[in-house]
Amino acid sequence: MKILITDGISETGAKMLQDAGHEVVQQKLSPEELLQEIGKYDALIVRSATKARQDAIDAGVNLKVIGRGGVGLDNIDVAYAKSKGIKIVNTPGASSISVAELAIAHMFAICRFVHISNVEMRNGAWPKKEYSKGVELTGKTLGLFGFGNIGKETAKRALGLGMKVVAVDPFVNETDMNVRLVNKDELLAEADVISLHIPFIKEEGPTLGAAEFAKMKDGVLLVNCARGGVVVEADLLDALNSGKVRAAGVDVFVNEPVTEAQSALINHPNVSVTPHIGASTVEGQARVGVEIAERVIDALKS
């Protein structure tokens, strides 16, 4: 069968598909080009860039499987694809460690001014006095929005640092980790650091906005390595300017690549930013490639 890969996977994953007897084409396509080409293929494998919406699904007249190399499925119209008899597979655990480690990295950066010190020292400054009031993560309470694979990996590392961890997740009722499950308002009131590991569901809207910021501790730290849209960016900027949020680490944005309208947030001195690279490690990408190949192969067999 013919498999189209539009956002790339590891060489190992591509070879697995070929060794299973499938014809593999790796090609980055615009939305218009995707509509023209997708009808030739039995399977489509995407990451986060390609959107498999209704028009693309309708054009994929031979599609049997859509695979997403990653955790979320928000760039795929899952219900519509399933209504057409198309199977949907993803890799929920493959990149969990990579994302968790980046979340922790942002926490360290904003606690100790690593992000802004790098900028200022390269411009010739020596801001020792200005950045002498960092804070430790040890002993602080980390609040996790989402306690799936990534949330659990983040919790493991936070516990290893001597943090207390609370989490909210509507799909998790118990855990064997030293993590206390709470409701949303309890988390907002208790957490010194908040890290998001949840999908963005368009119909439900953002998880954190002005109302939620008002319920947080003064000087809270916020990290978003989840999805653009789960935090209202304008409200986060207001909270940073008021000091309600001491600092933030952000890997995901409403618009990607970011636009001029987001420059105030991107350039805020109390914000550490990365360009949506949470899952982008050598090890994580290798696991994603192998896992998505295995799942697509199995789905095409059945």
Image: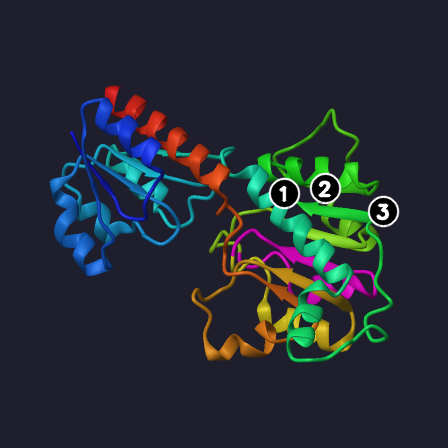
Between the C-alphas of marks 1 and 3, the distance is 21 Å
Question: From what the image shows, is residue 242 above or below residue 256?
Answer: below
Q: Who comes first in sequence, dot 3 or dot 2?
A: 3
Q: Does the magenta run of residues contain 109? A: no
- Callout 1–callout 3 Cβ contact below 8 Å: no
Left or right side of 154 for 45: left
Q: Which mark is residue 146?
A: 1
The three-letter code of the residue at mark 1 reads: Gly
- Decide: few, some or many residues near mark 2? Use Cα within 10 Å; few <14, some 14-19, many ≥20: many
Q: Position of residue 18 (x, y in %)?
A: 22, 28
State the SS at label 3.
Answer: loop
Between the C-alphas of marks 3 and 2, the distance is 17 Å
- Callout 3–callout 2 Cβ contact below 8 Å: no
- Callout 2–callout 1 Cβ contact below 8 Å: yes
Q: In the figure, residue 211 lies in which quadrant? A: bottom right
Q: Who comes first in sequence, dot 2 or dot 1?
A: 1
Q: Which residue is mark 3?
A: 138
The answer to whether residue 71 is visible is no
Q: Position of residue 255 (x, y in %)?
A: 45, 67
Q: Which mark is residue 167?
A: 2
Q: In the figure, residue 218 lies in which quadrant? A: bottom right
State the SS at label 1.
Answer: loop
- Which range is magenta? 205-227
Image quarter where the C terminus lies is top left
* Of residues 277 and 203, the one drawn nearer to the viewer in this rendering: 277
